[in-house]
Image (tube, grey):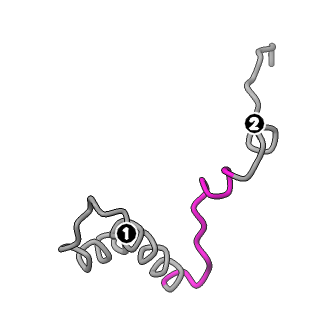
Amino acid sequence: MEGIIKEVLEHFKDVNLHSEVARDSIAKEIIKMLNEKTGTDYVYSRDLIENKDEDQINLFPTYEGGHLG
C-alpha cells in the first residue's frame, strides 16, 4: 500500500496541497489504484463508522474486571 501512495503522490507532486480539490483528487486516485491492484473495492473504515450509532460501533465494550483464575 505504501508503494501505491508514493506512486500517486509522485504523480501529483506539483499540486497545491492547500487546495481541498487537490487533496480530494489525490485521495480518489489512491482509492482507484488500490481497487485496481487488489481487485476489490477498498472502503475506508471511518466511512463505515460515520453512519452507525454508538451501540453498533462499540463491538468490544470496556472490560469491567473479574477474576479469571
Q: Is residue 51 left or right of residue 40?
A: right
Name above or below for residue 66 compared with residue 36.
above
Instruction: Report the front residue among 18 and 34.
Output: 18
For image coordinates 68% across by 57% down, the residue present is 48
Secondary structure at numbered mark 1: helix
**Image quadrant containing the N terminus:** bottom left
Quadrant in the picture for residue 12: bottom left
In the rendered view, tell whether residue 21 sits above or below residue 33.
above
Circles 2 and 1, Cβ within 8 Å, touching? The answer is no
Q: Which residues are magenta?
A: 37-50
Q: Amino acid at mark 2?
A: Phe
Q: Quadrant of the C terminus?
A: top right
Q: Which residue is mark 2?
A: 60
| Of labels 2 and 1, the one closer to you | 1
**Which residue is found at the position 42% from the left and 74% from the top?**
30
Identify the residue shown where x is 61% and y is 80%.
40
Q: Secondary structure at mark 2?
A: loop
The tag earlier along the polypeptide, 2 or 1, is 1
Question: Does residue 42 belong to the magenta stretch?
Answer: yes
Residue 7 in the image, given as x and y percentages of width and height: 29, 77
> Type of residue at label 1?
Val
Q: Position of residue 55 (x, y in %)?
A: 81, 38
Question: Which residue is under mark 1?
Answer: 21
* Alpha carbons under labels 2 and 1: distance apart: 37 Å
